[in-house]
């Protein structure tokens, strides 16, 4: 009788490539009946590989964020820094952190920032669209600090402050829960303050249509009126093509609404082109109502999306943008 390995080599008995590979592995490992389970092992391996590819970049970003916090802790201990995390004493550390993320942004997303001249010299409120992962916003913060040595304070969802091991990083980069009093105080001290009215809900449930999901949120407009500061719209091109969420399901939506926790993990990490556009400021108007200012701001952000984004979004088009040296006009 012709051996199974010999049959594979000679082709005397028709066999699939997987069967041949299974027979050879049986000979090599000494495990019998490997062919019976080999197909299932291959399918399982391919599925696990696909899952890893989908989630490896988001997990890598999370790793780098925690690594950044560890480096700040080492800097604080070695330099015996006890100053306020928002003080200039931390600027050298901020520059190092910003440089790292800016290099990452250039390499992975060919990141560009346009419209910095639209930022006021004094205080103002930046309003932006929230992607599945706000990595584009981290790129913006880094580039702004490197270019202007300016810190933009960020309003984040409450769940962010429940994440373990990030306290110092949040403090040094100016991330805050964003109560009305905190925002007014930051603006009074001359800071830029950034807010995404869509927040986690927009991150989880918006999609390649780039629909704004602000609900009835208008606190940012009231703060802008009370502080007498302009609102500046901002949007990053292709942010939904780089990182995505799974399609909305009623169960997941209900789970989020009841827990206010981002249960659904993002996936992707595709190295598409990112361009952040800062629009023209909406100046303070003492005669405008909160509702009118909300609508005016929403219209401004939507205009940036329509001007700079292909809708519905296309991952292939966003990848080709990496090779398009001619940017869309500002």
Image: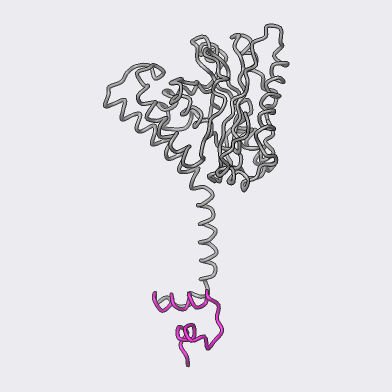
Describe residue 63's horizontal placement relative to residue 187 as left or right: left
Q: Which residue in the rendered view is the most extreme toward the front?
A: 326
Q: Position of residue 139 (x, y in %)?
A: 49, 32
Q: In which quarter of the image is the C terminus?
A: top right
Stretch in magenta: 1-29
Task: Inspect the magenta stretch and tell me whether residue 87 lies in it.
Answer: no
Q: Where is residue 210 in the image (x, y as percent from the top left)?
A: 67, 36
Q: In this view, does 227 lie above or below 168?
A: above
Give the colouring mode of the picture.
one colour
Q: Where is residue 40 in the image (x, y as percent from the top left)?
A: 54, 67
Nearer-the-camera pick, 218 or 33? 218
Residue drawn where x is 38% and y is 36% of the image: 67
Q: Which residue in the rendered view is the most extreme toward the bottom?
A: 1
Asked which quadrant contains residue 267, the reply is: top right
Residue drawn where x is 68% and y is 43% of the image: 249
Asked which quadrant contains residue 155, the reply is: top right
Q: Where is residue 230 in the image (x, y as percent from the top left)?
A: 61, 14
Per the picture, the main secondary structure of the magenta-coloured stretch is: helix
């Amino acid at each position: 009788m012709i051996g199974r390995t010999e049959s594979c080599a000679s082709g005397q008995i028709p066999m699939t490539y997987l069967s041949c590979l299974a027979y050879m592995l049986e000979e090599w490992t000494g495990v019998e009946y490997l062919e019976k389970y080999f197909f299932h092992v291959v399918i399982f391996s391919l599925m696990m590989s696909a899952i890893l590819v989908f989630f490896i970049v988001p997990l890598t970003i999370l790793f780098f964020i925690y690594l950044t916090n560890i480096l700040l802790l080492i800097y604080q201990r070695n330099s015996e820094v006890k100053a306020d995390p928002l003080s200039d004493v931390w600027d050298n550390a901020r520059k190092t952190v910003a440089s790292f993320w800016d290099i990452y942004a250039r390499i992975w997303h060919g990141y560009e920032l346009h419209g910095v001249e639209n930022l006021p010299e004094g205080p103002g409120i930046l309003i932006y669209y929230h992607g599945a992962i706000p990595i584009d916003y981290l790129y913006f913060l880094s580039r702004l600090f490197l270019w202007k040595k300016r810190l933009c304070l960020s309003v984040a969802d409450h769940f962010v402050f429940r994440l373990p091991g990030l306290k110092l990083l949040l403090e040094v980069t100016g991330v805050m829960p964003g109560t009305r009093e905190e925002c007014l105080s930051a603006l009074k001290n001359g800071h830029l303050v950034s807010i995404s009215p869509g927040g986690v809900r927009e991150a989880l449930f918006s999609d390649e249509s780039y629909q704004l999901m602000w609900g009835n949120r208008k606190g940012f407009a009231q703060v802008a009126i009370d502080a007498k500061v302009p609102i500046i719209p901002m949007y990053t091109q292709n942010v939904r093509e780089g990182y995505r969420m799974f399609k909305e399901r009623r169960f997941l939506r209900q789970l989020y609404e009841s827990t206010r926790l981002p249960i659904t993990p993002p996936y992707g990490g595709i190295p598409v082109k990112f361009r952040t556009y800062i629009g023209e400021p909406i100046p303070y108007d003492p005669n405008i109502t909160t509702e009118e200012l909300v609508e005016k701001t929403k219209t401004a952000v939507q205009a940036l999306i329509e001007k700079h984004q292909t809708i519905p979004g296309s991952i292939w088009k966003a990848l080709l943008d990496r090779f398009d040296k001619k940017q869309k006009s500002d």
